[in-house]
Image: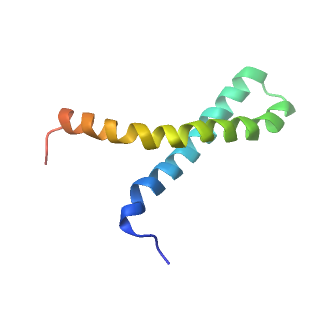
Amino acid sequence: MKLPARAAPVVQGLLLTLLMTFVVSGVSTLWALGPTTEVLRRWPEAWGMSWVVAFPTMLVVMPLARRVVVRLVAAP
């Protein structure tokens, strides 16, 4: 069963923020702690916290970003 088409922006934002926060929190944790086993313990916590901030932020900011893009990019 698929979700309705109107859910696409939220699902896209969910997946995008999950993947982006995974990568960014991993890089940041590795940078802060160095290549140690501690990174593997701390990364999931950093990832979870960053996603909790990123997803709602995306929901608020995305409409503004779309309006800016419409003003900057010519219509096809």
Q: Quadrant of residue 8?
A: bottom left
Relative image position of residue 4 (x, y in whole percent): 40, 70
Q: Indicate left or right for 22 with 75 as reference.
A: right
Closer to us: 33 or 13: 13
Q: Quadrant of residue 24?
A: top right
* Residue at the outermost right position: 37
Relative image position of residue 40 (x, y in whole percent): 81, 38
Relative image position of residue 23 (x, y in whole percent): 61, 38
Q: Residue at x 75, y 38 (%)?
A: 45
Q: Residue at x 52, y 52 (%)?
A: 15
Relative image position of residue 75 (x, y in whole percent): 13, 45
Q: Which color mode does the image show?
A: rainbow
25 shown above or below 55: above
Q: Residue at x 50, y 78 (%)?
A: 1
Q: Indicate left or right for 14 with 48 as reference.
A: left
Q: Quadrant of residue 10?
A: bottom left
Number of labels in the image equals 0
5 shown above or below 27: below
Closer to us: 37 or 60: 60
Q: Residue at x 61, y 41 (%)?
A: 51
28 shown above or below 40: above
